[in-house]
Amino acid sequence: MINDNSYLISKIMGISIPFVIMAGIYVIVNGHASPGGGFQGGALLSSALISKYLFNPVNDISIAKTQYVEKLLLFFIILIFVSFLATGINNMNIFPVKKYILFMNILIGLKVTCGMSIIFYQFVFFEGR
């Protein structure tokens, strides 16, 4: 496929994508203490992947592997949440709640990144089916 994008757009996107990724990671990591969290940070990370495809349309992401990772992340989110409730640690204040929320924000952010990227790539590659 021929890349029809201009030189200026390619350079600007190449420079801005690392900043979008850093902003997404910042929103995920600081979601327990400030506005934001897993969903908002995951949407930012997904927008970096989507914009990467828009200025350089190369099919380098496997949809099947991304779906597998998304299902695995959902399993871990449910497993950690249920184990947190089942152990009763949250009632004894032994478990550091901030670390639990941070870990859940990271898992949710990665799941949202995978999910939104899958939706975009499904529309791009399978739009005519």
Image: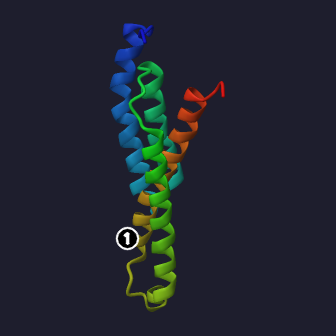
Q: Residue furthest bottom?
A: 92
Residue visible at 46% across and 52% down in the picture = 68
Front in this rendered view, residue 60 or 8: 60
Q: Residue at 58% of width from left, 39% of height from top?
A: 119
Q: Please state the horizontal and vertical placement of residue 35, each as a whole percent of the image.
A: 52, 55
Inspect the image, locate mark 1, and give the three-letter code of the amino acid beneath it.
Lys
> In this rendering, does residue 36 appear at all?
no
Q: Position of residue 100 (x, y in %)?
A: 41, 72
Q: Residue at x 45, y 59 (%)?
A: 73
59 lies above or below 26: above
In the image, farthest residue toward the right: 129
Q: Give the position of the C terminus as an image quadrant.
A: top right
Residue at numbered disc 1: 99
Locate the N terminus and report the quarter of the image it occupies.
Answer: top left
Q: Which secondary structure lies at badge 1?
A: helix
Q: Can you say whether 46 is above or below 123 in the image?
A: below
Tell which of 55 and 31 is nearer to you: 55
Q: Position of residue 60 (x, y in %)?
A: 38, 30
Residue 108: x and y, percent?
48, 57
112 lies above or below 100: above
Q: Is residue 122 above or below residue 58?
A: below
Q: Is residue 8 visible?
A: yes
Check disc 1: other Cα within 10 Å, few if <14, some if 14-19, many if 20+. Answer: few
- In the current view of this chain or complex, which residue is farthest to the front? 129
In front here: 124 or 54?
124
